[in-house]
Image (cartoon, rainbow, N blue to C red):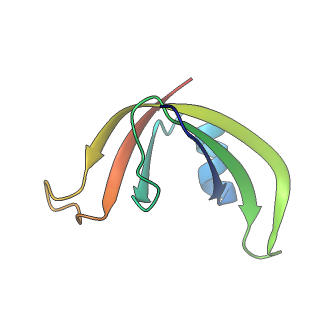
C-alpha cells in the first residue's frame, strides 16, 4: 500500500531537488519507507523556524536499506522519480 510522507526539507536541499539535480534522499527509516511511496517535501527555513510554503512531491522508485555498505541499520537511501 502506497503511503504519503510529509517531510521537512531545508532550502539548499529543496532547491536541488526541485531542479531534479538531487534524485535521492537519505533519511532515518522511522516511517517504514517503501517503493512507490510518495514523499511530499515541504521547504523549511531553519533560520526563520518556519515553512516557506514551497512544496514538491517525489515517488520512491528504489530503496537501499541500512545495514549494508556502512549505512546504519535505521537509515535508508531512497532514489526518487517524478
Q: Please state if 29 lies on the left or on the right of 1 as rendered.
A: left
Q: How many marks?
A: 0
**71 w.r.t. 38: above or below:** below
Residue 27 is situated, as x and y percent measured from the top left of the image, at 43, 57
Q: Is residue 25 above or below residue 38?
A: below
Please state the horizontal and vertical placement of residue 32, each as a whole percent of the image. Answer: 41, 51
Q: Is residue 49 left or right of residue 40?
A: right
**In which quadrant of the rendered image does the C terminus lie?**
top right
Nearest the viewer among 79 and 13 is: 79
Position of residue 65 in the picture relative to residue 38 (left or right): left
Q: Residue 78 appears at what percent x and percent y?
A: 39, 42
Residue 40 horizontal/vertical position (percent): 65, 42
The quadrant where residue 45 appears: bottom right
Q: Nearer the viewer, residue 82 or 32?
A: 32
Q: Residue at x 43, y 62 (%)?
A: 30
For image coordinates 14% across by 54% down, the residue present is: 68
Residue name at image x 23 percent, y 66 percent: 72
Q: Is residue 79 above or below residue 32?
A: above
Q: Residue furthest top?
A: 82
> In the visual, does 21 lie left or right of 70?
right
Residue located 35% across and 48% down the image: 77
Amino acid at each position: 500500500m502506497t503511503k504519503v510522507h510529509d517531510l521537512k526539507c531545508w532550502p539548499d536541499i529543496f532547491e536541488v531537488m526541485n531542479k531534479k539535480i538531487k534524485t535521492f534522499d537519505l533519511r532515518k527509516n522511522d516511517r517504514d519507507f517503501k517503493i512507490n511511496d510518495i514523499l511530499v517535501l515541504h521547504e523549511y527555513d531553519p533560520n526563520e523556524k518556519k515553512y516557506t510554503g514551497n512544496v514538491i512531491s517525489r515517488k520512491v522508485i528504489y530503496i537501499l536499506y541500512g545495514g549494508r555498505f556502512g549505512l546504519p541499520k535505521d537509515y535508508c537511501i531512497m532514489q526518487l522519480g517524478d
